[in-house]
């Protein structure tokens, strides 16, 4: 399945474009299919799972036919799909559920992490230790076991047939500065080095002394998601302490992607990165 979040956004863009081409406002289009104006607005904002019957009425009212009708209805069906993460979103954390959504159906994921090992490559022990750190556990009804189960589900996605390519740029500070008890950190680094040997996973370390062109660094963690349909947007997710920002505007996403590429220019090679991570692990106690 393709990310319902992304397909909702795509459907919103397609419907808005066709409504405007037809010279209709929200109210006029809503009246033509017998629904409230707010429903058209919500669909065009990509904030709600679409009602397929309403979408078919809209396509008819907008004169969409043939292959175009089939394509747009497929997008709507994808947008209405419920992912595995939805039933457990409260206990796995709403933020993590959103990342699971964005990862669904992606063909390529690029991530920069400045301070810790990212969730897709965490061991269960490291993830549990991180959740015990003050302020890390998601707010609300999330539970430790729920978060760990959600993390495991996301990691299975990375190992499924047809899994996306995953490229991680990890700052040297995240490798050298312990973000979990030392024995746990050691096993996590060894696991990270082992996962880097898998066909669809690339891990590269960004040295502290690396000089980034024009000094264009990133202030925090960033993930970039690409999808198989060229009409779907590339998505940027910017992590913060409390909430994450999801960016779909192509111009803005391009700016984040450019910053990522500048970091990649001065990162160690994959082979040198694995060696770097392995050596850092050996310097930590195993008990």
Image (spheres, rainbow, N blue to C red):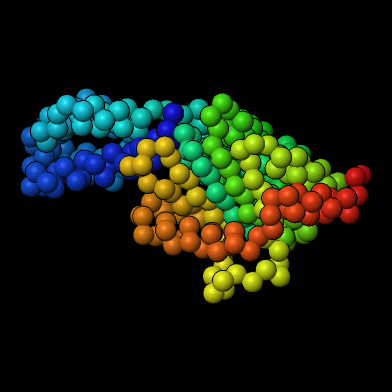
Nearer-the-camera pick, 133 or 22: 22
At 11% from the left edge and 36% from the top edge, which residue is drawn?
A: 62
At 36% from the left edge and 30% from the top edge, which residue is drawn?
A: 78
Residue 51 vs residue 155: left or right?
Answer: left
Nearer-the-camera pick, 135 or 219: 219
**Quadrant where the image shows the N terminus:** top left
At 43% from the left edge and 40% from the top edge, which residue is drawn?
A: 227
The answer to which image quadrant residue 241 occupies is bottom right
Nearer-the-camera pick, 127 or 104: 104
Where is residue 189? Give x, y as percent. 78, 47
Question: Taking 74 as reference, is 135 above or below it?
Answer: below
Number of numbered labels in the structure image: 0
Residue 258 vs residue 215: left or right?
Answer: left
Residue 241 vs residue 74: left or right?
Answer: right
Where is residue 131? Give x, y as percent. 69, 45
Does residue 126 show up? no
Does residue 22 show up? yes
Residue 84 vs residue 183: left or right?
Answer: left
Where is residue 125? Give x, y as percent. 76, 39
* Residue that sits furthest to the bottom in the current view: 214
Where is residue 38? Give x, y as percent. 20, 42
**Quadrant where the image shows the C terminus:** top right
Question: Taking 212 as reference, is 111 above or below it?
Answer: above
At 59% from the left edge and 34% from the top edge, which residue is drawn?
A: 158
Question: Taking 160 as reference, is 38 above or below it?
Answer: below
């Amino acid at each position: 399945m393709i990310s319902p979040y992304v397909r909702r956004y795509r459907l919103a863009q397609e419907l808005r474009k066709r409504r405007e081409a037809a010279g209709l406002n929200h109210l006029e289009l809503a009246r033509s299919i017998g629904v409230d104006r707010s429903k058209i607005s919500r669909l065009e904002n990509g904030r709600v799972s679409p009602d397929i019957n309403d979408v078919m009425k809209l396509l008819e009212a907008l004169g969409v036919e043939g292959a175009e009708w089939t394509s747009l209805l497929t997008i709507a069906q994808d947008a209405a799909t419920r992912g595995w993460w939805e039933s457990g979103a409260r206990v796995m954390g709403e933020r993590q559920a959103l990342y699971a959504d964005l990862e669904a159906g992606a063909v390529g994921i690029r991530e920069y992490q400045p301070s810790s090992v990212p969730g897709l490559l965490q061991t269960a022990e490291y993830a549990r230790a991180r959740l015990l750190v003050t302020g890390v556990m998601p707010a609300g009804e999330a539970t430790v076991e729920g978060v760990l189960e959600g993390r495991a589900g996301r990691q299975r996605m990375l190992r499924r047939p047809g899994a996306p390519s995953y490229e991680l740029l990890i700052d040297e500070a995240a490798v050298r500065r312990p973000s979990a008890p030392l024995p746990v950190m050691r096993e996590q680094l060894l696991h990270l080095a082992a996962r880097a040997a898998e066909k669809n996973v690339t891990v590269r370390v960004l040295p502290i002394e690396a000089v980034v062109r024009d000094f264009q660094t990133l202030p925090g963690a960033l993930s970039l998601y690409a999808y198989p349909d060229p009409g779907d947007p590339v998505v940027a997710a910017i992590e913060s302490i409390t909430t994450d920002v999801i960016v779909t505007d192509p111009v803005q996403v391009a700016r984040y992607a450019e910053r990522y590429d500048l970091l990649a220019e001065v990162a160690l090679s994959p082979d040198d990165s694995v060696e770097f991570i392995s050596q850092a692990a050996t310097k930590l106690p195993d008990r």
